Every structure is written in structure tokens, then in C-alpha cells.
Image (tube, rainbow, N blue to C red):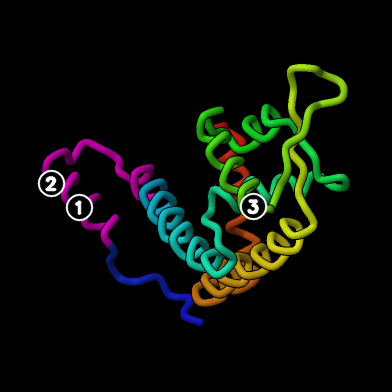
């Protein structure tokens, strides 16, 4: 495990350029959030690779995982899914269509609302998402362990939680 940060990264280069043209700016926020954005994009790509053998990308995984986390009977309304995943209703419909066609979930009328639907994870969908979540977590664990000690990882999650609480 390499616990030393690299001496210089692309975010440092961007901050250095700003320092030349705008020396009056404090680029520390840019350095923090630039790295968070880049890390997020890099990990999304890695997790997408982990989900690929299961025939899904991150978007489909998110739908199945949300249903799985909801607990038995693994059923939510499209509105509940959309709110949880923060995507448009159109985007949700496309994901649901694909996952239903693959036999990973079903849509049925809501018995309590004539106009509503219920989305339910199938047994096959539950088995697949249970396998995929393990693969995605393993990719994330490998990335953490390659750079941070367990204590550093706990510290980082606490700092990110604190930062997120003030920006959300």
C-alpha cells in the first residue's frame, strides 16, 4: 500500500495555472472538489466494469439495488425509485423497460392506487444484484486499500460526511 500522495497531479497543474493568471484566488476548494469529481468519475468507470459481467451498468444496478435495499417484498413505486435515484421519470422508464425485459423486475398495478404501479424485484434480479454488489464493493475496496490505511479510510469517510452535510 502506497500511503504517500503523488508529488503532482492534474489538479495541481490546474491550480498552478490559476495561480499564475489569478494569484488573488485561493484554489484550495478547487483542489478538494476537483479531486472528488475526478475520483468519482474514475470509480464509476471501475464499478461499471465490475457490473458488466452481470449484464448491467451502474444505472441498472442502482434500480435493482434500491429495490433490494428496500427489504422484502422488494417493491417500490416508480415515483419512489425516481426520488431515491434522482433521475427523470423518462430515464426511469427506460431503465425499468430494460430490466423488465431481462426478467429482473416486474411491474404490476398498485392495489391501493388505480393509476399507480408497483415495481418488484424478481428472484433472478435479487440473485444478480446480490452478486453484483459484492463485485462492485470489491473494486472499491481494492482502490481504498491501494492508497489508504483502514484508519485513513475511516477518517476520510467522516470528513466527506461532514462536508456533504454542509452542502446538501
Q: Circle 2 sits on which residue?
A: 20
Q: Magenta stretch: give its range.
A: 10-32
Tell me the element at label 1.
helix
Label 1 with label 3: CB-CB less than 8 Å:
no
Q: Position of residue 116 (x, y in %)?
A: 74, 22
Please tell me whether mark 2 or mark 3 is closer to you in this view: 3
Q: CA distance from mark 2 to mark 3?
A: 34 Å
Tell me the element at label 2.
helix
Q: Circle 1 sits on which residue?
A: 16
Q: Position of residue 119 (x, y in %)?
A: 74, 38
Q: Is residue 122 above or below residue 82?
A: below
Q: Circle 3 sits on which residue?
A: 158
Label 2 with label 1: CB-CB less than 8 Å:
yes
Residue at 48% from the left image edge and 76% from the top image edge: 3
Position of the C terminus, as image quadrant, is top right
Tell me the element at label 3.
helix
Q: CA distance from mark 2 to mark 1?
A: 6 Å
Q: Main secondary structure of the magenta part?
A: helix
Q: CA distance from mark 1 to mark 3?
A: 29 Å
Residue at 55% from the left image edge and 70% from the top image edge: 53
Q: Is residue 110 above or below residue 4?
A: above
Residue at 22% from the left image edge and 51% from the top image edge: 14
Say which label, 2 or 3, has the lower sequence index: 2
Q: Is residue 165 magenta?
A: no
Amino acid at each position: 500500500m502506497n500511503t504517500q500522495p503523488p508529488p503532482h497531479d492534474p489538479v495541481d497543474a490546474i491550480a498552478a495555472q490559476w495561480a499564475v493568471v489569478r494569484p488573488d484566488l485561493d484554489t484550495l476548494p478547487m483542489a478538494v472538489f476537483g479531486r472528488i469529481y475526478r475520483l468519482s468519475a474514475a470509480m464509476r468507470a471501475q464499478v461499471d466494469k465490475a457490473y458488466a459481467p452481470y449484464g448491467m451498468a451502474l444505472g441498472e444496478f442502482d434500480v435493482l439495488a434500491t429495490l433490494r435495499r428496500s427489504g422484502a417484498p422488494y417493491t417500490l413505486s416508480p415515483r419512489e425509485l425516481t426520488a431515491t435515484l434522482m433521475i427523470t421519470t423518462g430515464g426511469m422508464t427506460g431503465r425499468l423497460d430494460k430490466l423488465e425485459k431481462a426478467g429482473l423486475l416486474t411491474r404490476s398495478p398498485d392495489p391501493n392506487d388505480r393509476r399507480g404501479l408497483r415495481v418488484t424485484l424478481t428472484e433472478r434480479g435479487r440473485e444478480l444484484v446480490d452478486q453484483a454488489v459484492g463485485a462492485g464493493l470489491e473494486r472499491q475496496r481494492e482502490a481504498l486499500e491501494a492508497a489508504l490505511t483502514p484508519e485513513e479510510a475511516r477518517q476520510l469517510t467522516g470528513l466527506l460526511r461532514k462536508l456533504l452535510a454542509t452542502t446538501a
